[in-house]
Image (cartoon, grey):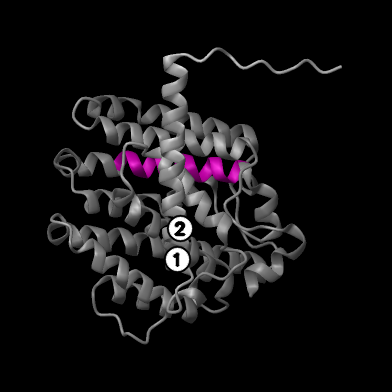
Amino acid sequence: MHERFVPAPITSRAAADAAEAGRICALALRAQIDLHAAATATEYAAFFPDPPIGPQVYSGIAVTNAFISPWSTSAELRLLNRAASWVFAIDLLIDHRATEQTEVDQLIAACLSAAGGTADPHEHPGARFLSALRNDLRTADAFPALEGLWLAELQRMLAAMAQEWRWKTAAAGASGATRPSLSDYLDNADNYGTVWINLTHWIHNGHRATLAHLDELLHISRVTQQIMRLRNDLGTYQRDVDWHDLNALMLADRPEVEQTIGHLSRSIQQPLAHLGATCPHNVQYLQRQADYITGFYAAGGEFWSYDAVTAEAHITG
């Protein structure tokens, strides 16, 4: 006979925690609705094929960012979420749909043109989505001074995606082709997109303390991005095998990967502590990014609409 569950007594702290959880979930729900509406709009729908980019991706992005930055409003999270959804889609195109280097180069050129404000209205839907994101971002007071940095980080991210495509293509096309080392793989972690996404978020909201310490925040964000890359790989090894993706566990054993995560985590503790008094929300934001992803993948979380049986059809169109 099962014992009847008896909830803990309601306390003011418990009630406050429940109310806060409800508020964050409402924030995530509004973000999910916005992302789904944007991605299914006629002019962008081809850029967000479902599957593998479906409701699971939008809800995953929305919930993640609501819990990482729970003090933010829906308006403050809007471009963060849209930038993240764009990274998912462009990664799919470069990583899995492109079959020639020229395709990768042309797609990257179209995106950089859009980000620079010179997009052809008949260009690729991914470039159009990025152009719309840029138009929203350029209304931020900080954008004129930081546009060059934003473009440079975008270019860095896309170049890293192209590098991973070359590694994968070489491995698939040549028997015994050498894979990158774990160190080289980590050096290419900008393909994960976190730094560019964070920079978009920080420019959009333009908090004075954030902008005053942007170089330090970007450094910490880049290390956090490497941690998240490795945490992702620890949790998605089988999916990466099915999708013919690279994964850190293909380059090193689990103890080495976990040891690397520990080293990276320790390396940013002092910089985070240094910024704690001047940028408390940013410090919490970066800490929560890594911690959230750790818990998400440890519990078997998955962003993609993923089915191992039909994985090949999903990624190749």
Q: Quadrant of residue 106?
A: bottom left
- Crowd class of label 1 (few under 14; some 14 to 19; many from 20; radius 10 Å): few
Which element carries disc 1, helix, strand or loop? helix
The answer to whether residue 227 is magenta is yes
Q: Is residue 295 above or below residue 315?
A: above
Label 1 near label 2: C-beta < 8 Å? yes
Residue drawn at 46 percent across, 49 percent down: 29
Mark 2 closeness class: few <14, some 14–19, many ≥20 residues within 10 Å: some
Q: Where does the image place residue 35, in percent across and percent down from the top left?
A: 44, 60
Q: Is residue 231 magenta?
A: yes
Disc 2 to disc 1, how far (Cα)?
A: 6 Å
Q: Quadrant of residue 84?
A: bottom left
Which residue matches tag 2?
Answer: 33
Where is 278 relative to 162, above or below?
A: above
User: Which quadrant: the C terminus?
Assistant: bottom right
Q: Which residues are magenta?
A: 219-234
For badge 1, the amino acid type reads: Ala
Q: What secondary structure is the stretch in magenta mostly built from?
A: helix
* Residue drawn at x 36%, y 39% as measured from the top left: 69
Looking at the picture, how far across and down is residue 130, in whole percent? 35, 69
Q: Please tell me which residue is depicted at 47% across the width and 44% down the height of the picture.
A: 64
| Badge 2 amino acid | Ile
In the rendered structure, the answer to whether residue 133 lies left or right of residue 50 reads left
Q: Is residue 92 left or right of residue 155?
A: right
Residue 146 position (above or below residue 268): below
Q: Which residue is mark 1?
A: 37
Using the image, determine if residue 262 lies above or below residue 103. Answer: above
